Amino acid sequence: MQGPLIDTLARQGITRRTFLKYCATLASMMALPPSAGLAMAEAIAAVRRPSVIWLPFQECTGCTESITRSHSPTLEGMIFDMISLDYQETLMAAAGFQAEEALHNAMKDNMGKYLLIVDGSIPLGLDGAYSCIGGRSNLEILKEAAEGAAAIIAMGSCASFGGIPKANPNPTGAVSVSDIIKNKPIVNIPGCPPIPAVITGVLAHYLTFGTLPELDDKKRPKAFYGETIHDRCYRRPFYDQGKFAKTFDDEGARRGWCLFELGCKGPVTYNACATEKWNGGTSWPVESGHGCLGCSEPDFWDAGGFYKALSMPADPLKIASAASVAGAAAGVAISVANRAKKGAARSAHETTGLADLEK
Amino acid sequence: MTTAQRVVVDPITRIEGHLRIEAETDASGKITRAYSAGTMVRGIEIILRGRDPRDAWAFAQRICGVCTLVHGIASVRSVEDALHRAIPTYSIPQNAELIRNLMIAAQFVHDHVMHFYHLHALDWVDVVSALKADPKATSALAQSLSSYPRSSPGYFADVQKKVKTFVEQGQLGIFSNAYWGPPAYKLPPEANLMAVAHYLDALAWQREVVKLHAIFGGKNPHPNFVVGGVPSAISIQSGGGHGKGPHYRGGQSATALNMAGLQTIQNVIKQMRDFVDQVYVPDTLAIAGFYKDWGARGEGLGNFLSFGDLPSKGFWEPDSYLIPRGVILNRDLSKIHPIDLDADTEIQEFVSHSWYKYSQGDGQGLHPFKGETELNYTGPKPPYEHLDVDKKYSWLKSPRWQGKSMEVGPLARVLMLYASGNAQAKELVNYTLKTLNVPVDALFSTLGRTAARTLESKILADAMQGWYDQLIANIKAGELRTFNDQYWDPSTWPRHMQGVGLMEAPRGGLSHWIVIDDARISNYQAVVPSTWNAGPRDTQGQPGAYEAALQDNHVMHDPKQPIEILRTIHSFDPCIACAVHVTDPDGEELVQVKIK
């Protein structure tokens, strides 16, 4: 394999081997077959970087900030070597007229081919006057940009599901991207914000295959949203044993007991925090002592309070014994199932090794 | 240019959120009147109404994902203040205060460095010119300024090659369509190359230093908080009592805040101090040296307000804050005026030029505890060319102190530190003025504002070590408390409470005002830094800080390339996901939140 990217990487001291390893890891992470890693490497190293247009609507810029925290690949790595980020208001040099012109040039030059990323919800109230850019409503801008897009990534919970602007009573009539655009492939990457590795994983998949990864019924990539936080939580053994932290700094909290009774939404939240973790694998919400807010689920803001346990048994005194009996049975079944899953995952990972790509 | 005209810049990029500037110029190209308009509203306040006050921080935090934790902290402080006002013995453990201080200061340093390199630098640094630089001369320049180790000719040659390849590919991406080249850009090619290299280094650095937030708060952006302390329990027992079961996914102890986590925090503090000392401070001074004329424009108001922050004896002891609370009027550093938070006539918000309606008429100002908000959009139907600036033209309100417009932010804080006699601040300010060879007046300017941001980063990064050492000393002494569970249960609360969560955010003084009835939020209002700075004119026609600053000595070299507007607006570091004031559907019992 060769090409300008490989030369560039070599100049930066990144060996071909390191690059291939990155692609292999990405492929494994997304449970793709061994050949995918090589395909990814070749696509990413392509001569012309695909155009990506990022539009911000009713957002807080947390999704953009999240992608700047991506460790592998890095944001600068993506901008220099993988994509041509032709419109991104937080990062772009141009402003005003020149920014709008950059947007229109990118759309014209890459008609039908560009990848559109949207963060933030879109307000339908007041003819869209609740959110305007350059005097135009978000709705108008989205419709125009979607027309020439090859596919759309709804970045974060607001673009995916309406997010916080849509929380009851939804004062501005906020909706998600898929509420408006019906004729384009859309992938939702929910999370408030989404995990950087998930963002870049989806981008890499798209750049490689020109298609979106396999999605679930909520248009989320199955590779990252296939299991609940609870399924993969390192504190799960304590749940199974009925050991729960009762406050944020009791002995249980210090020992890392389960946060279920403090309102953790891990059991009903599909996301990859427990496995990918955050900020280069440093920690994630449960590891730092706070229950999962459920931030990648639709309408999580209205799910009944962040400190309310999902379902409280009628008689708290019976929790311990009931939990230990039920927990033991459930725990065995779950751990068997998980062992099987983990075994499958491990063998898949091993077959997508570096050796395969170097053949 | 021969005739007066109106310049519209929308979108203002390299900021947080949606901001529009309209400026009128005279025949010489000088800005005579400027108008700042926030063009996005979400309505988080009505969304907050009726909810559990302990949940509010998570909603409020989503006001902004850039200064990502400040609204979360201001929110938990507002609930804690309500409890403290009702039950004077209520407080939070010292460890929690120390951890919050570390998180706040880390946010400042992270945010300021990213602002300087990734949002503001492209106003002063010409990326294309960097291609003409001699890497050897660049190395010599860098080494003359600082002991930063990444300064070899080979290092700069590599960066230059990377940029060259990028430019030659013809896909400029985020760097396309900029206003580069003379006469606006004045750095020599070597300084440009050095700054471009540090742009890339700062991106890598910021990814590392947010690990501090990840350890205490689980993730960044949007780390977690809790009313009554911090959620991260301290785990000092090795192993933490759990085995490597089928779900074990790493980590040596029960929570992230273990010995390894504390070591990471120490490393981050060192990385922050090193980068500020070796890169951020020298770069600011070096670049400023080429743009001294920007020390003579962009002042605006001359009035500065700070709520103060970073307590050493707790939130309710403002005298123990590192950053003092107070107001400076008309540049007079000899007097710091006190702020009376509860006086109806001190902090008020006006809506004469904002798309809201007050029940007793739009001309009056309302104190935030009594604030009301009813959305009342009277602007043009989109798409539009111009806003009607004689009437209402923004989603931001106009906050005032004793009827006066105020600037908040780094310049206000550094002046407050200077005026109150902080030795380090005085030394840094005097050193900066001397190095640049500019008069004291240069502080009150676009350049002064940008330099103040750098100087306070140095003060805060240095202060972090002290809080860290205190935290370690507490842990060694067996003091592990991080959370006060007394009054965690809302059924133990008085039926009616109100409180204000104050803090200094990177962009300035922030206040969240909460009214609680029967353990539910009945009113929630946030008066945020970018509303103080970016808000429109008030009832008396007094401009906000952005508007006043743009009206101070700005001659545009080419109205089609409004770099002058960008420089001064960016010197405030706008954060405009701002200005959300919303009423409930039947128009009664109004609530509001403006978003920073």
Image (cartoon, rainbow, N blue to C red):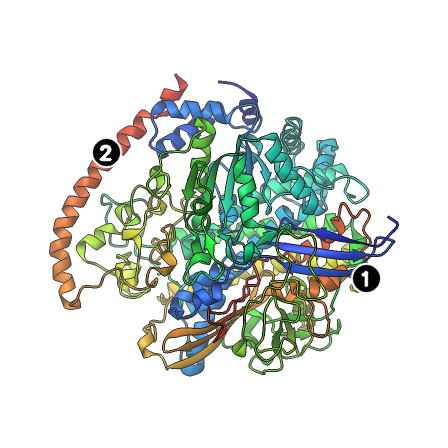
**Res. B424 image quadrant:** bottom right
Which chain does the residue under circle 1 lie in? Answer: B
Kindly identify the amino acid type of the residue bearing the numbered disc 2: Gly
Task: Tell me the element at label 2.
Answer: helix
Tell me if residue A354 comes above or below residue B275 in the rendering: above
Which chain does the residue under circle 2 lie in? Answer: A
Kindly identify the amino acid type of the residue bearing the numbered disc 1: Pro
Spatial CA distance of label 2 from label 1 is: 70 Å
Q: Quadrant of the C terminus of chain B?
A: bottom right
In this picture, residue B591 sits left or right of residue A297: right
Tell me if residue B153 comes above or below residue B585 in the rendering: above
- Numbered badge on residue B122: none
Sort mark 2 into few (<14), some (14-19) or many (20+) by Cα contacts within 10 Å.
Answer: few
Q: Which residue is mark 1?
A: B439
**Residue B452 visible somewhere in the drawing:** yes
**Residue B204 visible somewhere in the drawing:** no
| Residue B372: percent from left, percent from top | 54, 75
Q: Which residue is mark 2?
A: A343
